[in-house]
Amino acid sequence: MTDVQQVESTKTKKQKTKKQKRARKQPNQAEQAEWDKLVAKGKKLVAALDSNERNLGELADSVETKYRKKSLARFAEEIEVKFSTLNRCRSAYRAWKGIEIKGPSPKSGVLQALATHPAKEEILKNPPKTVREARTLMKDYRKAHGLQEDWRVGETRRWFGEAVKHALEAHKKYGHLKQEHFDLNILRQAVDEPDKLVATLRLGGRALNTLADEVECALTTPAALLPPPMFDDTDQTT
């Protein structure tokens, strides 16, 4: 084989490889068509969300999710609804999946609050009107049966509460930049190590973004696809 033929052969292989990569990146036409149908249906439900929360939850439940693929977040963006709202609707739907709800369906928050109550079907014959009332029923049930919240739940709630507080304080204090802090002459005198300052600020931002991504991923991925837990339910040690 001549040098020219070798070069042409190499170019052909590279072109084939690029085409194959592009083909792998292109979504399957059938999958894309199914996705488009879900999006169209989702937009209709969002247009009248108050009366369609359960239906929206059912639709969200049909969205195939894969670990770290953020499918539900992408779906929420395309149907123009907050991710937290969509995730709440899905969680409430899953908690009551397979249970017939006669009459008007209560709000998703009420259904979610009563999700683990053993008499939830009976309660729905005369359902609470507000989420607070539903949570009170659940709290009374736990108290009556001597059920205490797992200490790890409380610790995790407090830990995330601190993270949220820190994020809000950072946004409030540094999220709205003032030109007075960016006078070039002053800035050059005030910042001794600009590279270190920039790197540290970005490090903090990445930490909160990573935390947000991990929470979103964990809450939207089917349990079977998540990594195994760091401890099981019998582990009560710190």
Image: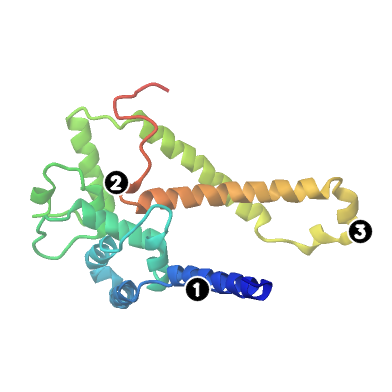
Residue at the front extreme, as displayed: 1
Q: Amino acid at mark 3?
A: Asn
Label number found at residue 185 = 3
Estimate how packed mark 2 is, as few (under 14), some (14 to 19) or many (20 or more) residues with alpha carbons within 10 Å.
few
- Compared with 98, 28 (above or below) is below
Circle nearer the viewer, 2 or 1: 1
- Compared with 189, 14 (above or below) is below
Task: Report x, y in % for residue 199.
Answer: 72, 48
Circle nearer the viewer, 3 or 2: 2
Camera-side residue: 226 or 119? 226
Residue visible at 81% across and 60% down in the picture: 182
Q: Please say whether residue 215 is visible from this viewpoint.
A: yes
Q: How many marks?
A: 3
- The quadrant holding residue 237 is top left
The residue tagged 1 is 19
Label number found at residue 224 = 2
Label number found at residue 115 = none
Task: Report x, y in % for residue 161.
Answer: 48, 42
Q: Split into 4 quadrants, where in the image is the C terminus?
A: top left
Estimate how packed mark 1 is, as few (under 14), some (14 to 19) or many (20 or more) residues with alpha carbons within 10 Å.
few
Residue visible at 84% across and 46% down in the picture: 193
